[in-house]
Image (cartoon, helix red, strand yellow):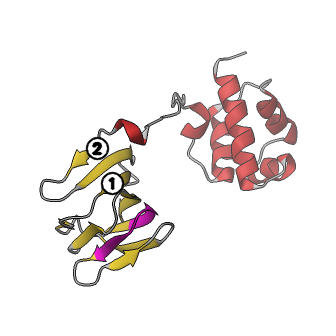
Amino acid sequence: MDPLGPRISHALRRERARAGLSVSELARRAGVGKATVSQLESGTANPSVETLWAIATALGVPFAVFVEELDDPPTLIRARDGGGIRASGAPYEALLLAAGAPQSRSDLYLLRAEPGAPRSSLPHAAGTVEHVVLVAGAALVGPTDAPVELGPGDYLRYRGDAPHVFEALEPHTSAVLISEVR
C-alpha cells in the first residue's frame, strides 16, 4: 500500500466523523462513489488528486489534511521546572506553554505571581484580547483603570490593546492566560 494510504485513511475517517456525515452523504456531496469513500477509509484505494480535492471540498477542510505528515508528539511542560520570563519590576513570571501558529496569532501562558508591585502592561498590538482563568490565589486583573478581583476558577476577558494590570493579592497566585490578536 502507498505510504500515503494510512494517512489518508485516518484523516478521512476523522474528518468525516467531525462533519457528522455518513459515507453515503459524503460521497454524494463530493460527487464520488460510495465505494470509493469506503475504500479510502479502509486504506485499500489509491485516490486521484481530483478525488481528494472533491472530498476535501465536501468536508470543508484543506487538501493538506489528507497528505500532510503530522509529526507532532505530545508536549509536556512541568510547571515546577520553571523556565518562565520574569518581570523586572514585579514578582511576576510568564511561562509560554504554546505559541500559536502564525495564522492563529494566539499564545498560551501560565502566569505565577506573588503579592507586591503589580505587573502593569502597556497596550499590545491593535486587536489584542486577553483571556485569564485564575487557577490559585487571588488577583486584580484587567484594564488598568478598572481591574477586577479574581478568585480560583474565575474567568476574565479584556482588551490587551489598552493598558492592563495583573496584581497578585495572595501568595502563590497563578493563572492561565491566552493572548490573541483578532
Residue 46, quarter of the rendered image: top right
Residue at disc 2, secondary structure: loop
- Nearest the eye: 164 or 54: 164
Farthest residue in the top direction? 1
Q: Quadrant of the N terminus?
A: top right
Inspect this view and state whether residue 30 appears: no
Magenta stretch in the rendered image = 131-142
Residue kind at label 1, given as amino acid type: Arg
**Tag 2 or tag 1, which sits nearer the N-term?**
2
Residue 60 location (% of width, % of height): 62, 53
Q: Residue at x 32, y 74 (%)?
A: 140
Query: Which residue is nearer to you in this view: 42 or 79?
Result: 79
Q: Which residue is mark 2?
A: 84
Q: Nearer the viewer, residue 94 or 174?
A: 174
Question: Which residue is rendered at x = 41% and y = 42% of the image?
Answer: 79
Of marks 1 and 2, the one in the foreground: 1
Q: Residues within 10 Å of mark 1 (few under 14, many from 20)?
A: many
Where residue 55 appears, as percent x and y from the top left, is: 69, 44
**The stretch drawn in magenta includes residue 139:** yes
Q: Position of residue 82 (x, y in %)?
A: 33, 39
Residue at image coords 33%, 54%? 112
**Residue 81 painted magenta:** no
Where does residue 87 sit, x and y in percent of width and height? 18, 54
Residue placed under numbered mark 1 in the picture: 112
Mark-to-mark CA distance, 1 and 2: 9 Å
Q: Are marks 1 and 2 in contact (CB under 8 Å)?
A: yes
Q: Principal SS element in the magenta part?
A: strand
Residue 13 drawn above or below residue 68: below
Residue 88, which numbered label? none
Tell me the amino acid under the disc marked 2.
Gly
In the image, taking residue 81 as reference, residue 12 lies left or right, namely right
